Amino acid sequence: MRDTTEPVSDPDPAQCPRVEPRRARDDAEVCLTLRHEFAYAFACDALRGARSVLEVGCGEGYGASVLARAFARVHCVDIGREVLDRARAATTATNVEFLHYDGVRLPFSDRSIDAIVSFQVIEHVTDPAAFVRELARVLKPGGSAVLTTPSRTYRLDPGQTPWNRFHLREYTAAEFGDVLRTAFPTVTVHGIRGSQRAQALEHARVRPAREGKKRRVEPPPAGLKALLARMRTGFRTGFRKDAPFGPHDFRVIDTDLDTHALDLLAVCTARG
């Protein structure tokens, strides 16, 4: 799901704007979408060996194509029927299926899925403990799940409620780990940190919202569409170090998560 600093009138999570790389309006949003794509690349490596993968909260489905290249079977679910229709229309991979999810029970039997990814979703759910129990229910014994969520301490002042009205709760690293451990016996929480320029862009993006102001978005620079196209190619073929933005602008960290992490990233293992 997309992290938006724009005001909304309907908190229905099915209507939340989703991450869609081609709609990035400036460098800050380019970095945001690349950060999401970094999580997909991490998951493809961390879940290597799994045949089936389930994405919970697939949004516009751009991640489905990434997963389809790494896994034999990809199941994608979302609560938004219209967004699922767009995802189906945009996905050409034949090993992907899109299914509606009511937000309560996943449409899969117990212990039937090898691996799960769920990115930028848990902050939207009303009962996070029930949500993670449902992920654990459908995972095969010893299967793994990779989840991300925005880092509360990078976005909010102490005691501040989320400025994104679609976010019911945002988490510190300890809080994220605690809720995941209600369903998974093994949980490791990492962080996604950006380069100096990526961290600065994210700080500039969220600061106005944290202060209750509307962020000013500069007009897209000439050639932005071409730049985004090169980025899409770069994720498949590898970037030069002099590329404008790319995977080299993000890395996984294991210390000082509440200070430096833009997103929290957790790897969970189901009971054997």
Image: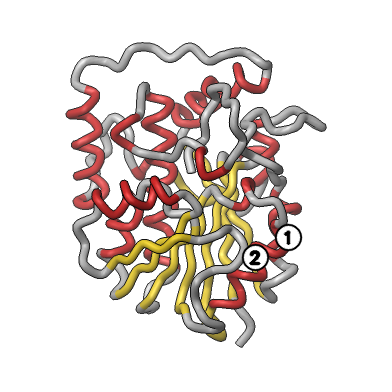
Q: Do the residues labelled 1 and 2 touch (CB within 8 Å)?
A: yes
Residue 82 spot, x, y in % from top left: 39, 46
Compared with residue 220, is residue 53 higher up or lower down, i.e. above or below? below
Identified at 38% across, 73% down, the residue is 48
Please give the residue where the numbered disc 2 appears in the rendered image: 132
- Residue nearer the viewer, 232 or 95: 95
**Image-based side of 42 in relation to 11, left or right:** left
SS at circle 2: helix
Numbered disc 1: secondary structure: helix
Residue 158, percent from left and from top: 79, 31
Q: Residue 179 carries which label?
A: 1
Query: What's the CA distance linking mark 1 and mark 2?
Result: 8 Å
| Amino acid type shown at disc 1 | Val
Badge 1 crowding class, 10 Å Cα cut-off, few under 14, some 14 to 19, many 20 or more, is some
Measured as percent of width and height from the top left, residue 180 is found at 68, 63
Q: Which numbered dot is residue 270? A: none
